[in-house]
Amino acid sequence: MLDVRGLPVTEVVVVNWRRADLTIACVESLRAEAAASGATVTVVDNGSGDGSAGRIAAAAPWVRLVQVPDNRGFAAGVGAALAASDAEVLVLLNNDALARPGFVSELVGPFAASPRLGATTARLLLLDADGTSDRTNSTGNVVDRAGNGGDRDWQRPHPVDSPAEVFGFGGGACALRVTAVRDSGGFDESLFMYYEDTDLSWKLRRRGWDVRYVGAAVALHRHASSSGVESELFVTSNTRNRLVVALRHGPWSMVSRAVSRTTVRLLVDGLHGIRSPRERRRAVWRARALGQFLARVPRTLAERRAVDAGASVSRATVVATLPTGASASEG
């Protein structure tokens, strides 16, 4: 089914948690293109409980508003929208991002001619406090040999000329073919936030779906506005989920490097002491994340076997495409 422009029927999903101001600005940046194309814009309010839903409904009555009772994370928010959607393609945009004109159509356009295209990922630029956007946030998702997932071209001066081929999509600005998401098992809601896009990129690749970077689709991003890079949520989720995703998908050499990296860092901190209160906090959070990872090892090993059983592409084939090193942001 195609819309009036000959593109797949599209729904844009923005997840909100207690930042109605950012979300309203985000959907406003999508408004003109959505009106011209007929695309639905959906805001999922993740149990904000602070009046966010009402403020968004008043400021943007043209959006579809989905309210969930509690905050179960980004993946669950997307899942709530997906469950009630009849779109062929879901476009995801972080609520702390602003779409440039043509963002949606550029991301969605390649799907019509590429039946095995599972995801497209946008050019995401860092939006500085002074309004400048001359640094790259992401041109897709990359994973290194130690399981570190991150943004390709992180902090590189804009513009960068990166190839369309990339390991994975960045969940902050991307488009997903709904049949590919469902075929691959969807987002893992248990990760809560961070690494959900890396995890689904692995699953898409193992099921034979392609991922493509579309540099003409541009959005501006206020990095980590929802949690902050110094927060317990950011540090704990990044550390735990990096280990979980490496164990679920990576070769054993990657798992070994990922676990060793975290363990050695904690041992060094313990042997030499930590003078800075900031680093002391972060060490406690990393230790907590390692414990959470270890507690779910049996479950993750079962998930690893399930992914292998349903895969149409070998792990070795996917790993062969990974870079030996990457210019990326990582937790």
Image (cartoon, rainbow, N blue to C red):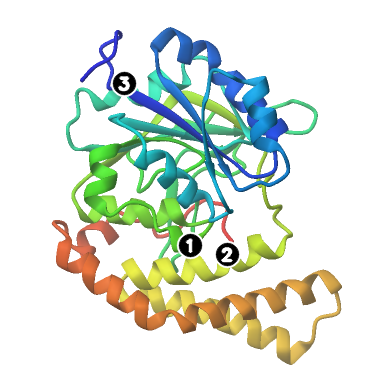
Please provide percent x and percent y for residue 10.
Answer: 35, 24
- The relative height of residue 309 versus residue 50 in the rendered view (above or below) is below
- The relative height of residue 28 versus residue 297 in the rendered view (above or below) is above
* The N terminus sits in image quarter: top left
Q: Is residue 296 left or right of residue 201?
A: right
Residue at 28% x, 17% y: name it.
Answer: 7
The residue at which mark 3 appears reads as: 109
Badge 2 crowding class, 10 Å Cα cut-off, few under 14, some 14 to 19, many 20 or more, is: many
The secondary structure type at the circle numbered 2 is: helix
Residue at 75% x, 25% y: name it.
Answer: 131
The secondary structure type at the circle numbered 1 is: helix
* The C terminus sits in image quarter: bottom right
| Contact between labelled residues 3 and 2, with CB atoms less than 8 Å apart | no
- Residue type at tag 1: Leu
Give the number of the disc on residue 41: none
Give the number of the disc on residue 237: 2
Give the number of the disc on residue 191: 1
Q: Write down the quadrant of residue 117 in the picture.
A: top left
Q: Nearer the viewer, mark 2 or mark 3?
A: 2
Please provide percent x and percent y for residue 214.
Answer: 39, 28
Q: Nearer the viewer, residue 84 or 158?
A: 84
Residue at 39% x, 11% y: name it.
Answer: 37
- Residue type at tag 3: Gly
Q: Nearer the viewer, residue 10 or 208?
A: 10
Marks 2 and 3, the one that precedes in the sequence: 3
Marks 3 and 1, the one that precedes in the sequence: 3
